[in-house]
């Protein structure tokens, strides 16, 4: 019962500070891979393609997208949560996936509890160690993220515990050996950095050395001395960084490691930050781990050297490994330091346990209790600073000289800029980074407090008792996990409408999804013209068809009337990133149509709409579904249109003149003149103007049977998909105008003609432009000199 209570208590605390915020590009990519695995069975980065563009070049895959290329365990476990959310009404995919580290962190604390019992510590020591591990170290801030480190921590800790148990059986238990192998595989599949834990795990599993106690003690003293010398060098380097020239030292070390002096200098900074800095070291961000120092002393006196060595090996292996191999990325981006040393925390906590045990045995020493209590409170303060606000709020509050960098030296080494100094000053000024606060749902923390209160009461009962495990009916043991599951589900339901993922047009987008599913076929793709609606589809878009692919904000787009675009050009290709163009071409090459969801339109006259402009220039718009001006769904046929930059005329001449200035000189039928019912009929009109028209004319066109009755009408729009306004035409300059329509499924076989009209709106009335040359009907409708055959 006690492990269950611990798990529920910690999960309740983590839920109360749960955010559900995509904190970085790394976690966005991880989630996208999990989402793809849940719904498509692959790891393609579709919903995050805006920041994970595939490399430019020809790609003949059905979905020519970048892959996650990460260890699969984190992706697999979170995909289970995503898939579950897909079957629970009102639960968002991102919201569900961000529960993973809540559960993993609580499970890691319970594993540490069992580990402590295996090492012979009492229940109270194990409980206190697990609570400090879960609440007074950086495990808590990382419980609200989607980073892989918490899962890696748990898998490594689980492997270490099972190896310890296997060693205690004198390596006789086959079952434990198999469990060890599974845990090691799990650790490797969570993050390959488990290799850095190999020396620690090997030491834990190794048999006792066949030497005397004095020899072991001397070896331990030598190891401590070497570690002390290394830390001393780091400390001197930090103290005298401004007065001593370390370049010769960096050059010498660089020669040994085959690295440049600047790379060695970066390693020096990383090691100092990981191990000694007052704002980023493992001790600074988890102060309670300072109790490892007296814990090691107690272990040393008892001759228990194994876990002293294991903790130091873990610390040095991870610190050196990441400092040497991560280069300029040693900090870990927008994260809470030291992100990469998170798997070291449980091993340091294992050597804290002797200090806690001694504290519990000598509880009458008030000064000792007060000192440890103050250290624990301070450690809690640091963790609260890590969970209260979005981490980006800290970098935004730093002075200009920081450059907005999380790894800025001032924030890691100067007291006024420490995270737990700066962030509390922002409380009350900056919104809390809690999901329930974001959606104004006070019931969430109420439910969490109820869980914490019940499990806390049970722990107090245990603490005031004999120290043995809580013994309650099995119904209670089952009720707590069920209550936790109910709170998680109820809490996620309360997040419906989270402004991080629900735009003002959320209801319109939700109503569009059934239309898309009904109109699409397997393999279809929905391109997002920008990343405006990307969060909605990541969290609430449960489409299996079409597959949503986001595109980045394009350099040719104008963000606002006041802010000019980065690129201004009449060439639509110049308005898109190179990667976007390659992706669109590759997608179009392997399917008959593309869907585009545009978040702007003609109602924003300053908006350039580069993606829509590009598609209208190279392919054929078939139809538009626009339930809202800011939600425009456009279907494109991917038949290649004439290149507007080629110096060539149309394949067919039309000879139509509208009014006294507009000429429909010719047209192309790229799919030929024979079709079946249900086919898409694309056509490219070739326009010219003798002089610039005064009006912006709209083109209407029809497929008409032999009796002159229109069988189907194409989409009315200004030429060029609406981007070639006739009032801006230059005399004599040809304009290609690509259009398409879908023939009805029940269209009778026979011969059909194409009719074309031009009109404009005048005070709410349609004004047709007369046909003054070429074949026409009633002088207002031009007839193309071609017959379209529809066969059965």
Image: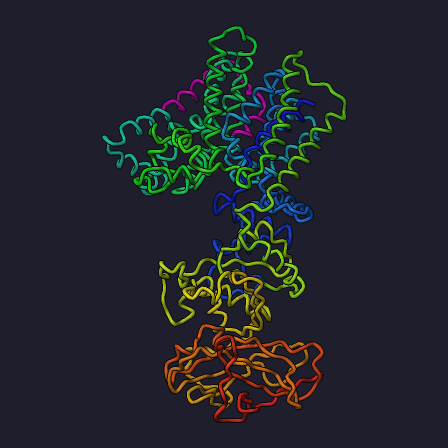
Residue 357 location, x and y as percent? 56, 14
In terms of depth relative to the viewer, which is nearer, 655 or 791? 655
- Describe residue 407's horizontal placement relative to residue 72 as left or right: left
Comparing 507 with 586, the one in front is: 507
Identify the residue at image location x=44%, y=32%.
427
> Along the line of sight, which residue is nearer the eye, 588 or 452?
452
Q: Position of residue 518 (x, y in %)?
A: 67, 63
- Asked if the stretch drawn in magenta spans residue 215, the answer is yes
The prevailing secondary structure element of the residues shown in magenta is: helix
Q: Residue furthest top?
A: 364
Residue placed at 55% from the left, 36% from the top?
18
Q: Position of residue 152 (x, y in %)?
A: 55, 36
The N terminus, quarter of image: top right
Residue span colored magenta: 200-229
Judge from the rendering whether residue 540 lies leftward or rightward of residue 320; answer left or right. Answer: right
Quadrant containing the C terminus in the rendered view: bottom right
Residue 148 appears in the picture as rendered: no
Image: 129 above or below 646? above
In the rendered image of this protein, does residue 232 appear above or below residue 573? above
| Residue 336 drawn at (x, y percent) | 45, 35
Q: Is residue 341 visible?
A: yes
Nearer to us in this view, 515 or 330: 515
Q: Is residue 164 left or right of residue 224?
A: right
Magenta stretch contains residue 242: no
Q: Determine the image quadrant of residue 460.
A: top right
**Rendered image quadrant of residue 186:** top right
């Amino acid at each position: 019962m006690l492990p269950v209570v611990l798990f529920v208590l910690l999960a309740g605390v983590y839920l109360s500070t749960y955010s559900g915020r995509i904190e970085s590009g790394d976690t966005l990519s991880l989630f996208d891979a999990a989402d793809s695995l849940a719904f498509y069975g692959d790891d393609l980065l579709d919903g995050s393609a805006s920041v994970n563009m595939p490399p430019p070049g020809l790609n003949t895959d059905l979905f020519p997208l970048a892959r996650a290329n990460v260890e699969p365990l984190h992706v697999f476990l979170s995909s289970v949560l995503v898939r579950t959310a897909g079957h629970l009404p009102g639960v968002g995919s991102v919201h569900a996936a961000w529960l993973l580290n809540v559960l993993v962190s609580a499970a890691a604390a319970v594993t540490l509890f069992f580990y402590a019992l295996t090492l012979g510590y009492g229940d109270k020591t194990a409980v206190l160690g697990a609570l400090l591990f879960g609440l007074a170290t950086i495990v808590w801030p990382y419980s609200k993220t989607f980073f892989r480190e918490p899962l890696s921590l748990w898998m490594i800790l689980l492997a270490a515990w099972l190896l310890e148990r296997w060693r205690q059986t004198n390596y006789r238990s086959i079952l434990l050996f198999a469990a060890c192998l599974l845990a090691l595989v799990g650790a490797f599949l969570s993050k390959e950095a488990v290799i850095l834990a190999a020396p620690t795990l090997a030491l834990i599993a190794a048999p006792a050395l066949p030497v005397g106690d004095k020899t072991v003690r001397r070896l331990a003293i030598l190891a401590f001395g070497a570690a002390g010398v290394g830390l001393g060098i780091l400390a001197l380097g930090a103290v005298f960084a401004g007065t001593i020239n370390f370049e010769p030292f960096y050059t010498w070390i660089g020669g040994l490691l085959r690295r440049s002096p600047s790379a060695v200098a970066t390693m020096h900074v990383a090691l100092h930050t990981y191990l000694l800095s007052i704002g980023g070291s493992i001790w600074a961000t988890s102060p309670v781990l300072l109790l490892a120092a007296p814990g090691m002393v107690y272990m040393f006196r008892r001759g228990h050297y194994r876990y002293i060595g294991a903790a130091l090996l873990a610390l040095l292996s991870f610190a050196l490994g990441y400092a040497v191999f991560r280069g300029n990325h040693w900090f870990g981006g927008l994260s809470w330091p030291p992100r990469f040393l998170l798997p070291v925390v449980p091993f340091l906590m294992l050597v804290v346990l002797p200090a806690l045990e001694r504290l519990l045995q000598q509880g009458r020493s008030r000064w000792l209790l007060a000192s440890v209590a103050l250290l624990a409170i301070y450690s809690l303060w640091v963790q609260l600073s890590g969970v209260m606000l979005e981490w980006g709020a800290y970098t935004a509050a730093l002075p200009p000289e920081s450059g907005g960098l999380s790894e800025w030296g001032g924030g890691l080494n100067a007291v006024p800029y420490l995270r737990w100094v700066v962030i509390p000053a922002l409380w009350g000024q900056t919104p809390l980074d809690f999901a329930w606060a974001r959606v104004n749902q006070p019931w969430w923390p109420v439910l969490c407090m109820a869980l914490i209160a019940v499990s806390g009461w049970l722990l107090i009962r245990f603490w005031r008792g004999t120290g043995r495990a809580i013994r309650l009916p099995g119904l209670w043991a089952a009720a707590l996990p069920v209550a936790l599951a109910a709170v998680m589900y109820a809490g996620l339901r309360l997040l419906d409408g989270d402004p991080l993922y629900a735009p003002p047009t959320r209801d319109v987008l939700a109503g569009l999804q059934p239309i898309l599913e009904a109109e699409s076929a397997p393999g279809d793709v929905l391109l997002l013209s920008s990343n405006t609606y990307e969060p909605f589809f990541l969290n609430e878009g449960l489409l299996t068809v079409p597959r949503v692919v986001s595109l980045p904000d394009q350099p040719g787009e104008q963000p606002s009337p006041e802010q000019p675009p980065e690129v201004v050009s009449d060439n639509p290709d110049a308005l898109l990133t190179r990667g976007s163009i390659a992706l669109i071409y590759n997608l179009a090459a392997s399917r008959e149509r593309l869907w585009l969801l545009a978040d702007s339109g003609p109602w924003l006259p300053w908006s350039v709409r580069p993606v829509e402009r590009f598609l209208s220039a190279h392919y054929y718009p078939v139809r538009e579904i626009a339930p809202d001006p800011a939600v425009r769904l456009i279907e494109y046929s991917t038949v290649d249109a004439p290149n507007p930059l080629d110096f060539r005329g149309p394949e067919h001449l039309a000879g139509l003149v509208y009014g006294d200035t507009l000429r429909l000189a010719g047209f192309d039928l790229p799919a030929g003149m024979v079709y079946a019912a249900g086919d898409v009929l694309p056509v490219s009109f070739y326009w010219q103007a003798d002089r610039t028209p005064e009006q912006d004319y709209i083109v209407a066109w029809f497929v008409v049977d032999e009796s002159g009755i229109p069988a189907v009408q194409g989409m009315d729009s200004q030429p060029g998909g609406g981007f070639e306004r006739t009032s801006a035409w230059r005399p004599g300059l040809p304009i290609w105008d690509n259009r398409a329509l879908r023939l009805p499924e029940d269209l009778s076989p026979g011969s059909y003609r194409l009719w074309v009209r031009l009109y404009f709106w005048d005070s709410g009335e349609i004004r047709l432009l007369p046909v003054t040359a070429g074949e026409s009907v009633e002088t207002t409708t031009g007839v193309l000199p071609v017959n379209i055959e529809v066969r059965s």
